[in-house]
Image: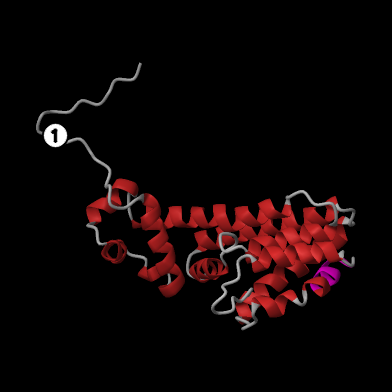
Amino acid sequence: MTEKPRTTPHEPRPVAHTKVTREDWLNVARDILISDGVDSVKVLTIGNRLEVSRSSFYWYFKSRQDLLNQLLAEWERTNTGIMVAHCRMPAKTITAAVNNFFRCIVDPDGFNHQLDFAVREWARRDGKVRRVIDRSDTARHAAIAEMFTHHGYDPAEADIRARVLYYQQLGYYALELAETLEERLTRVAGYLYCFTGVHPSAEEVEEFTRFALSFADPTPERSLS
């Protein structure tokens, strides 16, 4: 039986800060990382944005480095985890499987390319982060390659097709192409054929198009890239 910690009448019990949560600290830290880089992710800066004192921070994190470690772990869990999960979604055909991959790109709650590139920039100056990036890239590529082998592709061919698909998607973000969602959707059938060597069915293209347009902003056109 574990003995409960003792307190004295003059020793207040720690109470969680009710105004902000751990997720609030991480969300603001992520926003600052994306907009200003890792050097600007500071406890005081985040606290000012949340309008809380630094004492709130230490309820959830041991130090700034602990915050950065948790931020990096959250990025790996979400961006990499989401992409891997989509590659493993059930699909009757390889073109439907690639559409599942595309779904995590289109969904606003899916793959966050701005965060991905912010972490990659961070990795330029931090070997530990570089190793996490390398591990994530390896996991993503493996999941995409497995998606192809699951649908009958030779492992060597699956490896190449996975590289083309993954690097092409990262290239869209790196080039910051100003392409609207509607414009890119006109190329879905062509992309699917290019990536798989198989012509998709009209139903597969229509289903993905409906899914993508469900996230479209009716006011300004939303860019898929």
Return the x and y of residue 50 as percentages of the image width and height. 29, 61
Q: Which amino acid does the dot numbered 1 rest on? A: Glu
Q: Can residue 135 be seen in this view?
A: no
Badge 1: how crowded within 10 Å, few (<14), some, or many (20+)?
few
Residue 153 lies in the magenta-colored region: no
Return the x and y of residue 222 as percentages of the image width and height. 59, 75
Return the x and y of residue 96 as percentages of the image width and height. 80, 58
Q: Is the magenta stretch mostly helix, strand or loop?
A: helix
Location of residue 155 by image quarter: bottom right
Please give the name of the residue rendered at 79% of the width and 54% of the height, measured from the top-left corner: 147
In the rendered image, the residue lying farthest to the left is 10
Quickly name the residue at label 1. Answer: 11
Please give the name of the residue rendered at 63% of the width and 81% of the height, measured from the top-left corner: 175
Residue 193 lies in the magenta-colored region: yes
Location of residue 4 by image quarter: top left
Range of residues picked out in magenta = 191-197
Location of residue 133 by image quarter: bottom right
